[in-house]
Amino acid sequence: MIDFEIPTPIKRQVQFITMLGEQVMRPVARYYDEHETERPWDYINLIWPTIRDRGGRSFSVEDGKEKTDKEGKPRPRIGYLMLAHVVEALSWGDAGLYLCTPGGALGGAAVDATGTPEQKERFLKRFGEGEPKWAAMAMTEPHAGSDTAAIRTTARLSEDGKEWILNGEKIFVTGGLMAAKESRGFVVVWATVDPSAGRAGMKPFVVEAGTPGMTVTKLEHKHGIRVSDTAAIVFNDCRIPYDNILGSPEVARGDAEHKGFKGAMKTFDATRPLVAASALGIARAALEFTVAYLKDRGVKVRYGVAPHLQTAVERDLIHMEMQHRAGWLLVLKAVTKMDAGEENALEASMAKVKAGQVATYVSQKAVELLGPEGYSCKLLVEKWMRDARINDIYEGTGQINRLIVARRLLGYTSRELR
Amino acid sequence: MISFTPSEEQQLIIDTVRRYAADRMRPAAYEADEKRTIPPDIISRGWDLGLLPSAIPEQYGGFGETHQALTGVLAAEELGYGDLAMALYLMTPNLFAIPILHYGTEEQKQKWLPRLVEGGFAHYTAALIEPRWSFDPHALHTVAEREGNVYEITGHKALVPLAADAHAFLVYAREGEKTQAFIIERGTEGLAVLERESFMGIRALPTYELRLDDVYVPASCRVGGEQGIDIDRLMDYSRVALAALAVGVARSAFEYARDYAKQREAFGKPIAQNQAIAFMLAEMAIEVDAARLMTYEAAWHLDKGHNATQQAALAKAYADEMALMVTDRAVQILGGHGYIREHPVERWLRNGRGFSTFLGLAMV
């Protein structure tokens, strides 16, 4: 039945995070924007116990067991719905800090989407104990961004067949420094076992932090989300255990059931709606601030007035609000399908396209509507605009996601519509 | 718990109306638009779907339980998918029934609702819109003044559907600072149905201007008696209805353009295999779905009894813009063919442009 009621546990969680956003994240947001090489340990140490106590499986949100309510009826899974709300609310607090949140992040999502139960246990357990840790995902290379099948990082078996040897360079690894060097985390590296095989040769490998041969060579200086580190990582004869290839051992032999490129795509089905949620958290921050700021100065919004009778500012604010809402509902649809265990690649990309566009538009418009104040570093609005911009780029640009949506709608393969 | 899946009962309604839209409305839409008339059997078959009676409780002659805006918008999308003019025609009795259902006195409900649901298509309509650029349902120029037990109503209305055949009208007028609704029967002195109007779109729907020159009606004709109506909420029922119709119109344009782009070849391949076309289609589909979800959400708030003006207004504003964008792009994807009337897309563009004007012309 069509229903828009948000489950109570989610409401409570959002309330808690909103408080965290107001009291912990917002006050330091500007500082870390201006000190991008410092790590936000105050935020990390504060949030880590919460994450750790939930098992730290921030992406692997459900254990697969059937949950039942008091009467023994099966309870709907709300893992991704919860996560979308959490990510949205944290990003409302500060998107840069959200990206510094310890836990599995995209690396965890990749393990969750492509790993065996044994691998999930082995790699994800760490996020429920001890010190804060991070995981990251390394896909992009200097010459290959959206065209992921063109990656050149190689993985070959050692002569005794007990190890994989990785060689190549990865860039734009979100949280790469924290995952590869500054904590006992790991990096999921996409590499090819057969460069001539294209997509079929692509496999995910887990490289533990501190593995010899893996070096963080550069940290980027970015337009926004500055506090989150974005690393370049070089693999130079980096040796990892054989069973750190994600999925069943057969993947290396290219079985039909392989989880190579498909695994990457499955990871994206889970992560794209969450990136979209993050985008819309920033957009909501900008929108709410702008509405409140203008309201204090006598500008009010009348709903239900015909567009040609609205003031220009009113029209902009209504437009921003409706675009934001539209994006958010698409996110909710994508994650509810995910929770129901249904195929959601189309909805995930639709949500990502819309949210990337909306966050960019809303935050840029907010700067305009506040005039010189909006452009000023006195307020966070200009920062939100810079933070928002990445969301139409990472985890698949708006264009790549349009391509995915179009292929699905038209029933075309990637060869038919390229 | 958040869900976007209709109930089984709702899905049955969707399927039934969709079949009617595809089999009956769609094939007749071109000629209806050209000749500016809708074949009576299409109307009677549409009426037989029982959409209005199922929204009206048994005690007033219907077979419904509680009136659900959500069920209404699900059906409206399918009707809009069939043809907008026919959809508006079929939904015209709602304009009379829904305000009475929600705000009418017991006496008014007893008197009017059974007449709307017994027998064939019920010719009842409403007059809200006025022929001026600054039309605002909260500041009508049609005025009602009370003298003792009688109202004197004077004004000028436009876009009154089916006025020529209507047995009774629900006329909205300003009384003091508030908008109220009055039931005025056909033939009341001072009430004149003017010539049929002509618009860019919805050409098969007969609409008329209406003049009210010193029309006197008993005070008992004011909907809701002393309580009156809540114009905001009624407009919300209209907003979600129009948003749903816009989604239907846009969906038909999207599907047509998608299918055309897959079969039309240029430079040795279907034009859909070009990103320029494919991206347009992707964006159209995203916007249609987003508008649909906004509409569902607003209708859900209405059914929950929440104040839903914000959601309904946002849903409508979104759908207005979306319908124009999607139908316009469908014309563009068909190129020259899109401009030719034998293809439906130019009609959908003419219809789609109207949504920002239509407030009050449909209700669920």
Image (spheres, coloured by chain):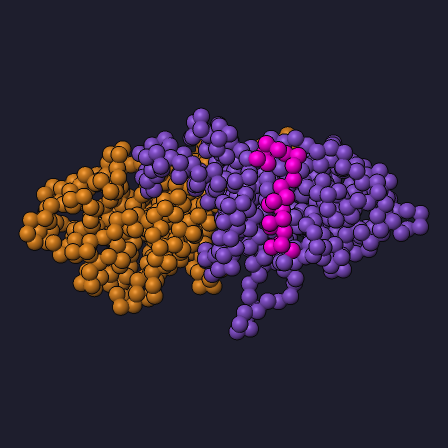
Chain colours: A purple, B orange
| Farthest-out residue, front | A42
Q: Residue at x 26, y 63 (%)?
A: B118
Q: Position of residue B192 (x, y in %)?
A: 15, 43
The main secondary structure of the magenta stretch is: helix
Give the magenta range.
A31-52
Q: With B266 as the anchor, is B45 left or right in this view?
A: left
Task: Say whether residue B48 is visible.
Answer: no
Where is residue A35, by image quadrant?
top right
Q: Find residue A96 and report its horizontal and vertical position in percent.
A: 59, 39
Image point 90% across, 47% down: which residue? A158
Q: Nearer the viewer, residue A399 or A25?
A: A25
In the picture, measured across the screen, residue A114 lies left or right of residue A97, that is right
Residue A258 horizontal side relative to residue B265, left or right: right
Is residue A78 something that shows in the picture?
A: yes
Residue B210's place in the image compared with A244, above or below, is above
Which of the image's four quarters has the C terminus of chain A? Answer: top right
Q: Can you tell which quarter of the image residue A212 is in?
A: top right
Q: At x 36% / y 37%, what residue is drawn?
A: A295
